[in-house]
Amino acid sequence: MARGKIQIKKIENQTNRQVTYSKRRNGLFKKAHELTVLCDAKVSILMISSTQKLHEYISPTITTKQLFDQYQTAATVDLWNSHYEKMQQHLKKLKEVNRNLRREIRQRMGESLNDLGYGEMVNLIEDMDNSLRLIRDRKYKVIGNQIDTSKKKLRNVEEIHRNLALEFDARQEDPQYGLVENEGDYNSVLGFPNGGPRIIALRLPPNHHPHHHHHPTLHSGGGASDLTTFALLE
C-alpha cells in the first residue's frame, strides 16, 4: 500500500511535531553514519530543536574543531576573526573604564589634578562635599544608636540598683520582711545581675532540717534557726 504524500509545512500540534522531529533526526543521523562508513566521508550535523535542545552527530574519525579547521582551509574563511575583533573591542572599553575609575580615585585623594579645568574642579569639590555629608550622616546615626543603647543599659542598671537598695533597706528595718507564714513555702527570690546566684529564703517547720529532705535542685545555705536560705542551682 502506497504511503500518502505529506505536505511540507509546520506541524501545529506540539506532540506530533516532537515525534516527527525525533524520528527524522534519527533517520538523518543514520544516513550520516552510512556516509561516514561507506564513503569515508567526514560528516558533522548540528541540530537545535524548537525546545532549544542540541543534538549533534560527528564522524568518529574526526573532532568538531578539526572539522571546522578543515572547513576554514577549504572555504578560505576565518570563522573566529569577527568574534575575536568583538572581544578586542569589549576589552578596550573595559580598560578605558578602569583607567577612568583609577583617575577619579586619585583625584579624590588630591592627586592627578593638573589636567582638570576650573569647571571639573568645581564638580569634583561638589562630589566630595556630597560624599562627606553622607559619611557624616552615617557616622552620627551610628553614634546616636550607640548612645541610645548605652542609655538603655544605664537605665536597666539603675533600676536593678534601686530595687536592691529598697530590698536591703526593707530587710534592715524588718528582718521578717517578705517571709510567708505558710510552712514550707518560699517567701522571695533575690536575683543578682550578670548570671549571679539567686537565693530563696524559707521558713521551715519545727524540727525540720534541710539535710533530711534535700531538694535535688536546691542547695542549702545552712543555719541553726528555722529561717534557711537556699541558692538556686542553674
Image (cartoon, grey):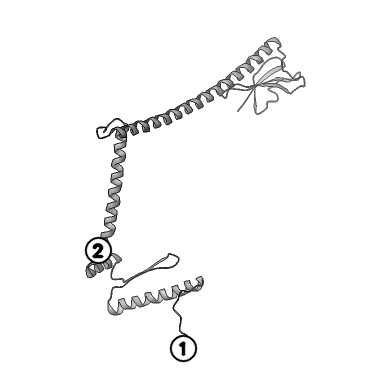
- State the image quarter where residue 201 is shown: top right
Residue in the picture at 46% in, 88% down: 2
* Residue for badge 1: 2
Toward the right, the furthest residue is 182
* Residue for badge 2: 78
Q: CA distance from mark 2 to mark 1?
A: 48 Å
Marked residue nearer the N-terminal end (2 or 1): 1
Left or right? Give the position of 150 relative to 178.
left
Circle nearer the viewer, 2 or 1: 2
Relative to 16, is 85 above or below?
above
Q: Secondary structure under badge 1?
A: loop
Q: Amino acid at mark 1?
A: Ala
Residue in the picture at 69% in, 18% down: 228
Q: Secondary structure under badge 2?
A: loop
Relative to 103, is 139 above or below?
above
Q: Residues within 10 Å of mark 2 (few under 14, many from 20)?
A: few
Relative to 93, is 202 above or below?
above
